[in-house]
Image (tube, rainbow, N blue to C red):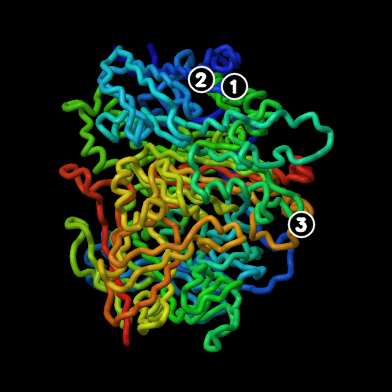
Amino acid sequence: MKRREFIKYGMCGLTAVALGTIPLPPFFSRKAEAANLTVNLSMEEALVEMIDGTRVFFWLFQLQGSAFPSIPGPVIFAFTGDRVTINVTNNLDEVHEFQIIAAGRNRRNLNTGPIQPGQTATLSFIAPDGGTYMYLDPRNAPVNRVLGLHGAFVVLPAAARVVPPPLLGNPNPQPVFPGPILPNGNAITPYTRPTAQVQQLFNDLGAQPFFEVRPGEPGQFWVPVRPANQPIPDPLRHALEDRLLPANELARLAAIEPFLFRTRIWVFNAVDPFFNAIAQAGGNAEPGGGIDPAVFRANFLGRYFLTNGKSGAFSSLEDTAPDTVLAAFIGEPHVVRILNAGPPTFSPHLHANHFYVLAVNNVVLESVTHPDTMTVGTVEKDIPFRRLQADPLGPTNRLFLNGGSRVDWLVPYIRPPDIPGNRNILLQDLIPEELATVLQVKGLEVAQSPLEYPMHSHVEIDQTAAGGNYPQGLITHFIFLGELINGVEVPFPEPVIM
Amino acid sequence: MPLPLIRRGIEPPQDIPMFLKFVCPPTFGGGPLDPQPPTREVSRKLDTMIDIPLPPSVAAVTRAGRDDIRAWIIEDPDDPNGRTFPSPIIRTVEGDIVWGDVGFAFNTHTIHWHGIEPTPMNDGVGHTSFEATANFIYQFATNTAGTYFYHCHKNTVLHFEMGLYGMLVVDPPNPGTRPDIPAAPFPTGGPGFVSAFLPNFPGFVPGANVVPYDVEAIWVPDEFDSICHELGHDAFMQKCDNNNPNDPNNFTQDGILNDFIPDIFFITGVFPRVVQGNLNNLPIITAVIRPNTRTDPDTGPPATLVAPTVRVGQTLLVRLLNAGYTIQEYRIGRPGDALDATVIATDGRPFGIPGTENQYSSPFVIPAGTRFRLTTARRIDMLFRPTVPGIFPVVIKHIDWTKTQNAVVPIRELVWGITRTIITVVP
C-alpha cells in the first residue's frame, strides 16, 4: 500500500459536503451522570500545505467518519469519571503505538503497546482528574509524535457537567453569570482538585474590583461549557454559519464548540520537512527505516512552526482560525490550554494582559504567578513527577521556572491595564480617535477597531517560515471585540470607511 | 489512491483587509492618539548602527571572523552618551503616564514596551497596528512597578537579535523610610525600593509593600550569531503582493533566520574574552566578568552593573532578563553558600501582594547553587542578603532551544556557550 502522490482538491468539492452530514462521536452529554464515551481513531497519511504552499507529508490521526485526517489530531473531551474507550486503527505501513501521557492512576501513562499495520488496539479507562493531557505515538520518540501523531485530550472535572440553569430570556440586562456556581459556593475551575490559590482566583473573577470591566461593572466567572441557552460566541458562530472552513474542520468545530466557549486549546509543533520527506518515501523511525531518532533530535531544524496545524496569518485571523484566536469582550475570562508536541522549547508571550499560570503538566500550582511570558518545553525535557517532589524548589516553583510541555493559562481578559485615563470611562469613549483610525494599505482601508494584539513565541526564530517571512510562524491573535456594559456585550464602534 | 491534502487556510480569505494588515502592515506617524497629560517624557531614535569592538579571543571564534560586531541600537537622542548597547535604561514611576517620542532614522520600525499593556497603536506591533515611518509619540501608563524592557517589533527575529532593545524599569514611589534613598525613579545601580511582599524582610514598608535595596544589578544574558549581523534590514522579509495577499509567493523567502548558531556570548552588553572552546569544540566559555572588566567606553555599560559589589548586611536586587534565543540555565553561588536568592516578582508582577490581582502567588527562595532556567523574554527579580564576605560565582549556560549535542548521546543538551560573572561581598 503506497499512496505517495497527491492531487489538489478543489474547494468547491470540499464545501459541497454539508455541515452535519459527517457522523461524529458524542463528545459529551449535558446529563449530570458519568457517560460512556467511545472514540474511534485511525492513523493515516496526508499532505499538509505549509504557509508558503509547500506540501509536507505527515502521519495524522483521523476520526472515524471524518472525511479527512486532522492536524493536530482531533481534541477529545471527557469529564472526570467518564468511561472512555479509544479504538486506534493503524492504517500506516509500520508499527505505531498510542499513549496518553500521565492519564492513568498515579500519573502513569496509558499505552496500547505496539499496533501492527492494519490492526486496531483499544485503550479503555476511567477519565482522570480534570486537566490537559496529550495523546501521542510514543514510539521512536520524538519522531512519530513530531511527524504528526499527537493531539489534545481534555478532561473537565465532573462538577463542570452541572452548568447553571437557563438565564437567557430575562429581558433585564444583567450579568449572564451572576455568581459562583457550585453548591459549596465555589466557582468552577478546570480542575478536580484545585489548589487554594487557583480556587480563590476563579472565585474572585466575577467578584473582585481588580477583575471589574470598570468600577461597578463586574467581570464574568469562567464557564467550562457553553450553557445551552447561550449563543455561540462570534468567531466560532461566524465560522460555522458562514462555513468558512473545509467541511471536516467545520464538523469537528461544531462538535467541540461548547467547550471552546471560554477556552482555547493551542497545540504547538515544529516541522523540519527533511524528515517528513524520508517518511513520504517509505521510510520510518524503526531500525533501518532511515530516520534515526537520535539523529532527528540532534539535527532537527524547524522550518515551519504551527499552532493547531497552521501558522502566521492563517493561525491569527478569526476567519481562518476561529478555534485558535482569542476573540472576546473585556470581562470574559478564558482558559488557554497549551500543549507542545514539537522538539523546540517555546516561550509564548501574550500582549495586552498578563495571564495566570494555573498548571504545568497537570500539576495544579500552589503559587499562581502572573507573567506575560512562559516557558512551554518539549516532552523530552519534562521533569518526572517523582523528581519534582524531591526538588529543593518544590514542584510549584520548579515548574514555574522551567515550564513543561503542557501549560494551562487563565487570561483574565481585563481592559489592557496600561491604557492611560479614567477607568470609570467606557473604553470606547476614552480612545475614540484610535477606534476611528483607518489606515491605507495598498489601496485598501484597514481599521484599527476592534483592538487586536498578538500572542507569539518570543524565541523569535519560531516567528519565521522557510527561514524568513516574519511573522509567519508560531503566532495567534488576542482580540478585544468590545466591553461589557450592564452585563451586555457591546462591540467597539466600527470606523467609518469612506 | 491519492493522499488527502489539508490546505493551509481558506482561500481566498474572507477578510482581505485584515489579511493585508497582517502581511503588509500600514505605516503611520504622529501621535499621540487620544492624548492624556503626560507625567514623563522620553525620546528614542532607531536604528543607529554601531560597531562594538570585540576582544581578539572572541573575534577568533566567530563565524564572521571580524574584530568587531555590527549592532543596531535604539539611541537616546537627548543624551550625548545615549548610543549604548543595550539601549539606555528607561526608568519611570508607578502611575506615570509616559510619552515616548520615537524617531526613525532609517526605514520603518516600531517599539514594543514589553509587559506594558496599552492600546494596539501604542503597543508597537506592526501587523496589529502600523509601522512608523516618521516620529510617533507612544502613550502608555506604567501602572505596576517592576522589570520590563523595550524592543523593536519589526522583523523581530533579526531586529531583536541585532540589539534593538533596552531595559524599562518601573519604580514604586519612595515611601520615605530611608533618608539616603532619593525620590523615584531611582538611580540605576541603587539604592532604591522595589515592590515585594516580604513582611519579615529588613526595611519592609507595610501598606506600600516595598523593601529597600542598596545595590542593583541588571543581568541581561544574550548571545549573537555573527552571521546574522552581516544581514540587511529587510533580510528575508515576506513580500507583499497587493493584488493577492494570500499568494503563497508572499511567503517564499528562503532564509537562514531559523538556523541560529550563536558564537558571541555576553551579559548586559559586557563582552568578556573567550577562555575555552570554539564552534568545533563546544561550548564557548567566556572569562568571568568582574567589576573591573574593561568595556568599550562608547557603547558599553560599566561591568559593575553585571558584577555587583555589596557589603555584608546590605541588600542586593538583581533584575534578570533572558534576551537571547537560547534556553538559559543559571546557577548563582555554590551549594551551601550563604547566598540564597529570594524571588519576589516576575514580568513586572510582584508575588503575593494582598488585595491585588497579584495575591495568588508567593515569594520563594532559590537555594545557592540550585540550577534554574528561563526562556526568552522572561524576567525575574531576586533579592540577596549576604551574611559572609566572599566572591560568589554566577554561571549561565546558553542551551540550544531545540537540538541535542549529538546523535551519540541524544539526551545531552547542546550548550552553545557559558557566561560567568560574580557577586562580590565585602565586610
In the rendered structure, the answer to whether residue A1 lies left or right of residue A326 reads left
Labelled disc at residue A378: none
Judge whether B42 appears above or below A210 on screen: below
Judge whether B201 appears above or below B2 on screen: below
Q: Which residue is mark 2?
A: A35
Assess whether mark 1 and mark 2 are in contact (beta carbons under 8 angstroms).
Answer: yes
Q: Amino acid at mark 2?
A: Ala
Where's residue A380, x and y in %? 30, 42
Instruction: Look at the image and tell me whether residue A495 can be seen.
Output: no
Q: Which residue is mark 1?
A: A31
Q: Residue furthest front?
A: A184
Pick whichever, A385 or B171, lies toward us. A385
Instruction: Look at the image and tell me whether residue A295 can be seen.
Output: yes
Where's residue B412, x and y in %? 22, 48
SS for dot 1: loop
The quarter of the displayed image where residue A180 is located: top right
**Residue occupying image coordinates x 35% and y 83%:** B312
SS for dot 3: helix
Pick whichever, B387 or B34, lies toward us. B387
- Between tags 3 and 1, which lies in front? 1
Q: Amino acid at mark 1?
A: Lys
SS for dot 2: loop
The subunit letter for the residue under badge 1 reads A
Where's residue A162, x and y in %? 61, 29
Q: Which residue is mark 3?
A: A430
Disc tally is: 3
Pick whichever, B16 or A340, lies toward us. A340
The subunit letter for the residue under badge 3 reads A
Q: Amino acid at mark 3?
A: Leu
